Image (tube, grey):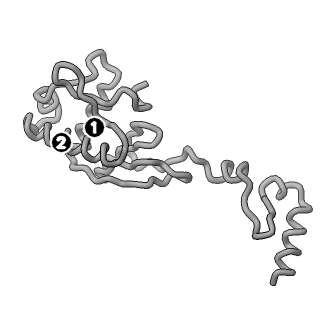
Amino acid sequence: MNITLYGYVHILTRNREFCNYLEVKKDGITLAPKALNTYFVEEIYSDEGDDIELDKNIILSQKRNRLLLHKKRGGNFEKEVRVSPQAARLIAYCYQIRHNDENSRTLQELADALAGGSKVSISNRIKEVTDASTDNGVTILHKFSGEKWGLNQRLGCCK
């Protein structure tokens, strides 16, 4: 078996095209970083239609009510954190207003904008999002002066 493997390695390494993509070592054959980045792009992500990219490593999946955190190679994420539908709508609304002159809202303004919410329920959703994000080492919502809330301006979508 080893003789056959080494025979294939010899054939592969003699073909210049394959040499660009393989690293042959005594313990096996691996794809070279150049090939890995060519065929398994790091910055790729399969969008489900309503997904919002908040940052390079943070996606809000509105269809599944999930925060996808810490992107890995190939479009996968280390964590999927479930959030309530109202919390997902809160984040999506803050995303919509992120470039407005008034990019933050009071609890009452958020409750009115999200129709069917009260100041208490919005406050609970803000706590839900901040707890979920803090537990996972990210900051999604930010409290501005005047008791207003909006997206963290350091997120990639706000720049």
Provide the residue designation for mark 2.
Answer: 125
Provide the residue designation for mark 1.
Answer: 91
Under mark 1, the amino acid is Ile
Q: Is residue 118 left or right of residue 51?
A: left
* Front position in the image: 152 or 15: 152
Vertical relation: 87 (above or below) 23: above
Q: Secondary structure at mark 1?
A: helix
The residue sitting at 55% across, 53% down in the picture is 74
Which picture quadrant has residue 140? top left
The residue sitting at 28% across, 50% down in the picture is 65
Under mark 2, the amino acid is Arg
The residue sitting at 48% across, 50% down in the picture is 46
Q: Which mark is residue 33?
A: none
Which of disc 1 and disc 2 is earlier in sequence? Answer: 1
* Front position in the image: 17 or 22: 22
Vertical relation: 141 (above or below) 69: above
Vertical relation: 29 (above or below) 109: below
